[in-house]
Amino acid sequence: MISPTMQNALNTQINLEQYSAQLYLAMGAHCETLSFKGFAHWLRVQAGEETAHAVKLIDFLLDRKGKLELKPIAAPPQEFGGVIQVFEQTLAHEMGITQKINALFDLSRTEKDYASEITLQWYVSEQVEEESNVGQVVDHLHAVGDQGGGIWYLDSRMAKRMAKA
């Protein structure tokens, strides 16, 4: 059994993961309106990963005989600026999610909930990868700028991103 405190915290994180998926879908649609289909594709793949993260937490919660409490997901913004701003916002969002995961991990230790701690270790490691990947995109975008052939080259590279197996 999972404690009510941990159950509530996991339900909150599930909602955050679902919001992340919605945010990245909105960002991808925005990039597509700017004719950057590769960046749009990258963000759609990311949205799928966020959904998978939520489902993984749902499965864990249910395996522990917890109660899933889905709550409304806030609507993401519709305007994000240029592609560089989109990915700067993506990085900032991932950094915020890292803080939430770290707080959840701390809670699992406070609650002496070792099963949650072990499960959340995967999310801690995943956030290192998420920040690194998005940070690299931001660095590349800053290097090439938002004008000229460089950004179109990056767009074509982003179109090759594959979903994790």
Image (spheres, helix red, strand yellow):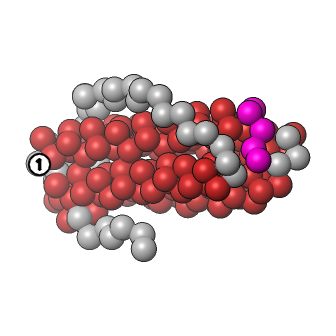
Q: Is residue 106 left or right of residue 50?
A: right
User: Which quarter shows the C terminus?
Assistant: bottom left
In magenta, the rendered stretch is: 1-5
Q: Is residue 14 above or below residue 154?
A: above
- For image coordinates 56% across by 55% down, the residue present is 59
- Give residue 53's position: percent from left, percent from top: 50, 54
State the residue lying farthest toward the bottom. 165
In this rendered view, identify the residue nearer to me: 149 or 138: 138
* Residue 4 included in the magenta stretch of the image: yes
- Tell me the SS state at disc 1: loop
- For image coordinates 31% across by 67% down, the residue present is 161
- Give residue 126's position: percent from left, percent from top: 58, 59
Question: Can residue 144 be seen in this snapshot?
Answer: no
Q: Is residue 157 above or below residue 27?
A: below
Mark 1 neighbour density, 10 Å: few (under 14) some (14–19) many (20 or more): few
- Give residue 104's position: percent from left, percent from top: 71, 41
Question: Can residue 97 be seen in this snapshot?
Answer: yes
Figure label count:
1
- Give residue 96's position: percent from left, percent from top: 57, 37
- For image coordinates 23% across by 64% down, the residue present is 159
Task: Report the predominant secondary structure element of the magenta stretch.
Answer: loop
Tag 1: amino acid = Ser
Residue position for label 1: 35
Q: Is residue 109 above or below residue 126?
A: above
